[in-house]
Image (cartoon, rainbow, N blue to C red):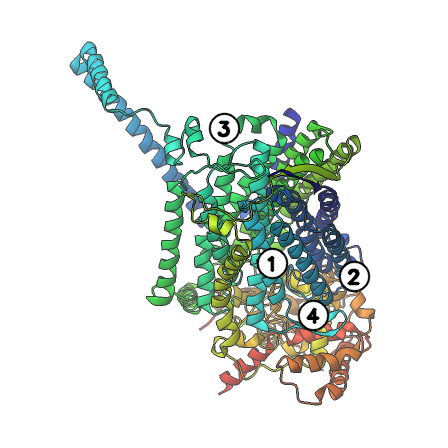
Amino acid sequence: MKPLKAILLFFILLAVQPVLAEDQSLTSAQLMNYWGYGAIMLMLVLFLVVLLVLLRTFKVLTMAIMGRKAYVDMLAEEKALKMKDKKPKVNVVEKLLSLKPLSEEKSILIEHDYDGIQELDNPTPAWFMVLFYSTIVFAVAYLLIYHVFGIGQLQNAEYATEMNIAAKERTLYLAKAANRVDESNVKLSTDAAVLSAGEAVFKQTCAPCHGDHAQGVVGPNLTDDYWLHGGKIGDIFKTIKYGITAKGMPTWEKQLTPKQIADVSSYIKSLHGSNPANAKEAQGTKEVDDAAGAPEKTAMVIKK
Amino acid sequence: MQPEKFYYDNKIVRNFGIATVIWGIIGMTVGLIVAIQLFHPAANMGNQYTTFGRIRPLHTNAVIFAFVGNAIFMGVYYSLQRLLKTRMFSDILSSIHFWGWQLIIVSAVITLPLGLTTSHEYAELEWPIDIAITLIWVVFGINMFGTIFKRRERHLYVAIWFYIATFVTIAVLHIVNSFELPISAFKSYYVYAGVQDALVQWWYGHNAVAFFLTTPYLGMMYYFLPKMANRPIYSYKLSILHFWALIFIYIWAGPHHLLYTTLPEWAQSLGVAFSVMLIAPSWGGMINGLLTLRGAWDKVRDDVVLKFMVVGLTAYGMATFEGPLLSLKQVNAIGHFTDWIIAHVHVGALGWNGFLTFAILYWLIPRIYKTELYSKKMAAFHFWIGTLGILFYAVPMYWSGFTQGLMLKEFNVEGMLKYPNFLETTMRILPMHVMRSIGGGMYLLGVIVMAYNLCRTALRGKLVANEAAEAMPLEPVYVKQTGDHWHRLLERKPIQLMIVSLLVILVGTFVELMPTLTISSNIPTIASVKPYTPLELQGRDIYIREGCVNCHSQTVRPFRSETERYGEYSKAGEFVYDHPFLWGSKRTGPDLQREGGKYGNAWHYNHLMDPRLMSPGSIMPNYDWLLNQTLDTTTTASKINAMRSLGVPYAIGYDKIANRDLDKQAKAIADNLGKDHIKVKSDKEIVAIIAYLQRLGTDIKANKTVSSNK
C-alpha cells in the first residue's frame, strides 16, 4: 500500500499546484470572508472547549465540597438507580436504523425463497420514512411558494430584481468614479502609463483581427492615414464602444470599461505612421490628423 | 408430483458478457480520447471523423447502450432463468436479440463519426437505427415475457419487477423521443420544435438514466448481492415501497435539465419538486443493499466482489443525493452547463454501473466456466485502481465546475463582467481536464486488467453452456395463503404488474408533456421570428452534423451574468422553427444563441479554419474541411418540404425556387468575404454555416431596434 499512498499524494499535489499558483487573485473582500469564516469556526471550537472546561470544574468543585468519599458513593448510588430502570441494552445505531439484532433474524425470515434468496420482513426504517415524508412536504411547499402564494420569485421577476440591484450599484459607483469618459469628452493622451495600459488591451482584444502591430488582418490597417469610420479620438472611441457590427467590428461596451476604451484609443493613435510590415492596403477616406502634430501634453482630464 | 429437469442457457449469458467487456474497453477508450481533446486540440487528429463533436456522442452511446446495455442483458438472462426456474423462452430469440443489438452498436460506431446524428443527446442515432432498436427491444420483451409465462416459480421476485418496469418504460421513452420525419435514408427532422422538442428530449434523457442505468441495475443488485453475500434481503416491505415510489416519481424529474430556460415554469417547478422527492426512493435501493450486507461485513474485507458492490452502492447513494441537490434552482444556476454535471454523471456511471458490472462479471464468469477466478490479486488491483480512477476523475471535475461556474458569474466593482472573455475561464480549468483524463486512464487500465483476468479464467475452465437444474412444476391452481402481503397478488400476475407499472409511469408523462405539447399559449409566438432561409437551413444541418451542440448551448438564461455576456435572454417564441432544438447541455465554449452579427463573416471564416488564429489558446478543433467541401444543394427541396409539413410556413412551391435564394445569399457572403481578401467559392459548406451563425438570435434583435425606434 505504501507506493499507492505515495502515488496518491503525488497526484493530489499535482492537482493543487496550478491552483496554488493562480489563486493570488483573491480580492481583499474575499480574503475578509475567509477570515470571517475562520473566526466563526474558531469561536465555535473555543465555545466547545470552554464548556468542557466548565463541566470539569463543576465536577472538581462538587468533589471538593462533598469530600471525595461521599462523592464516589453518590455516583455509585446514582448508577445503581439508573440500572434498575434500564431495559436491556439496545445498540443506538441499530435503534436509529430500526434494526433487529441479528440473533432475532430467524423470526422475521419470510418463508419463500427465489433461487435460494430469502427476504426479511423488516419494517422500512423510521428515519427513511421521515426523510421521505419531509421531502414530500418540501416539494408541496415549493410548489405552493412559487406558484400559489407567489412568495418565491419566478425567473423573470428574479432577473428584474437582479438587474435593478446592479443598476443601483452602478449609479452609485459612477457617481464616485473618475472614469466617466465617453465619445464626446475623451481626450488624446500620450502619457506612458496610459499607452502601456492601452497596449495591453490592444494585444488582448484587438490584435487577432487588426494584427499585432495594427497592420490589419481581417480588420483594417490602423496605422495609415485612411479611416473608415473617422480617425479622431472620439470617432475611434465610438467605433470601439458600439462596434460596426455590419462589417464585423464587435461591440466592446460590455467587455471594456470606458477607461480601457479611452486608453486603447490613445494607443491606436500613437501607432499612426508606424508603417508596420505586411500592412493592409488603405481603406476609407484620408484624414489629416489634427492632433498628431500637437497632442495634449497632459493626461486625460474629465470635465463635466 | 415429480421435479422436472431442464437446462439453463449459459452461452447467451457468456456472449453478452464478452460483448460487455469489449464494448466497455472501446467506449472508455473513446472517452479517454475526447477527454484529451478537451485540453489538447491536436488530439482531434485533424480530420472530421474524429473531432470531438462527432465522437463524444460515440463515447456516450458506446458506454450507455453497448457497455451497460450488454451488461444488463447478461445480468437479466442469467438471473431471470434462475429466479423463474426455467430456460429462456426461445434460444432463437436470444440469439436474434444478441446479434441484433451488436449490429445496432456497430451501425452507431459507423454513423456517428460520419456525422449522421439527430442531435438529441443519448438518442443521436438516425431513424433507421431507431426502428431497429424498437424491433430488437420487442424481441427482448417477447423473450422475457415468454420466459415468465413458462416459469416454475409462482411469484416474481423484486428483481423481475425492475426488469419489467425497465422494459415498458424504455419502450415508451424510445418511441416518443423518436417521432421523426425522414427526408432521406439517414436524415430526419424531429416532429416537435424548440421548447416542446426540448421537453420531450429531457423527459427521455433523464429517464434513460432512470430506466436504463438505474432500474435494471437495481434489479441485478437484488439478485446478485444476496447471492454474493449469502444473506437474505434486508426488507421486503422496503423493496415494495421503493420500487413503486421510484418508478412513479422518476418520470416527472426530466424538466430539471431545463431550469431557467423558456420551458413553462410550472413544468420546471414540477421537475424540481419531484427530483427532491426522489432522494428517499433512490436511497431505498442503496440501504436495502447495504443492510443486506449486515452480518457479512467481515466478508467484504476479503471478497473483492463485495468490495465492488459496496463502492458501487455508495456511489449510487452519492449520485442520487447530488441529483436532487443540483435540481434546486439556486444550485443549478451555478452547476448547469459546467463540468460539475460531468462529474455527477461519472460518479454514477463509473461507480454504480461500472463497479456493479465488474462485480457481476467477476462473480458470474467463474461460475459458468466451473472454475476459480484466475487471479484474485489482479481483481484487487482492479478494485483499487478503479476506485482511485473515480476519485481522480470526479474531484478535479467538481473543482473545475465550481471554478468556471463562479468565474462566469463574477462582476467587478465597475459593474462589468470580471471575465468577459469566456476563453479565460476555459484556460483556468485546463489543468483539471488533464487530471480528469489521468483518472479516466486509471479506470480504463483497471478494465483492461479485468479483461485479461477474465480471459485467463475462461481458458482455465470450460463453459457449461447448458447447466442442468430441476424444479417442481407449478400447481395449476394457486391456493391463497393466509397472511400473504397484499402485494403478493401482483407478484403472481406478470401482465397486470406490467400494466400497473405502465400506468404509474404514464401519470407523470401525461401531466408534464401534454399541456406543453398541445396548448399553444404555453409557447408565446413572436411576430418577427421568421423561418430560416434555405442557406441557413443547410448551415444548421452542418452545425448538427459537426455536433457543435456538444460544446455550445443556444439558450441564454435570465441572469445578469448571461445577458451581459451574450445578450437578451431567450424567449420561447424564438425557437418555434427549430426542428430539432439545439439548446445543448454543456458550455465547453460560449453560448451561441445571440452569435448573429457579433463578429464579421471573415472572423467566422478564419475562426472555423483555425480557432486559434482569432482566439489564441482556444481548445476548439479546426473545421478546415468546411472550406473545401461543396454544399449538397440537392437536398434543399426535400428539407423545405419536410419543414413545411412540420408546420414551418414556407410558401407552397417555395421548394422549387429555394435554391435560387440559396445561391443569392451564398454569393453575397462570398463577395463580402472577398472584400477581406478571402477567396472562397459560394458553393462551399463554410458559407452555409456562416450564414446560419450570422442569423442566430437576430430576429429578436431586429425586433428590439424596431421598438426602440418608435
Give amino acid for label 1: Ile
Instruction: Identify the chain of the residue marked 1, using the numbered disc in the image.
Output: B
Give amino acid for label 2: Gln
Q: Viewer-nearest of labels 2 and 4?
A: 2
Which badge, 2 or 3, comes first in the chain's sequence? 2
Residue tagged 3: B295
Secondary structure under tag 1 reads helix
As measured in the structure, the alpha-carbon distance from the residue carrying label 2 to the one carrying label 3 is 56 Å
Which badge, 1 or 3, comes first in the chain's sequence? 1
Secondary structure under tag 3 reads loop
Q: Viewer-nearest of labels 1 and 4?
A: 1
As measured in the structure, the alpha-carbon distance from the residue carrying label 1 to the one carrying label 2 is 32 Å
Residue tagged 2: B48
Residue tagged 4: A272
Depth order, front residue of B70/B587? B70
Q: Quadrant of the N terminus of chain B?
A: top right
Residue tagged 1: B170
Asked if the residue at tag 4 contacts the one at tag 3, i.e. Cβ–Cβ closer than 8 Å, the answer is no
Q: Viewer-nearest of labels 3 and 4?
A: 3
The image quarter containing residue A61 is top left
- Tell me if A221 is positioned left or right of A36 in this view: right
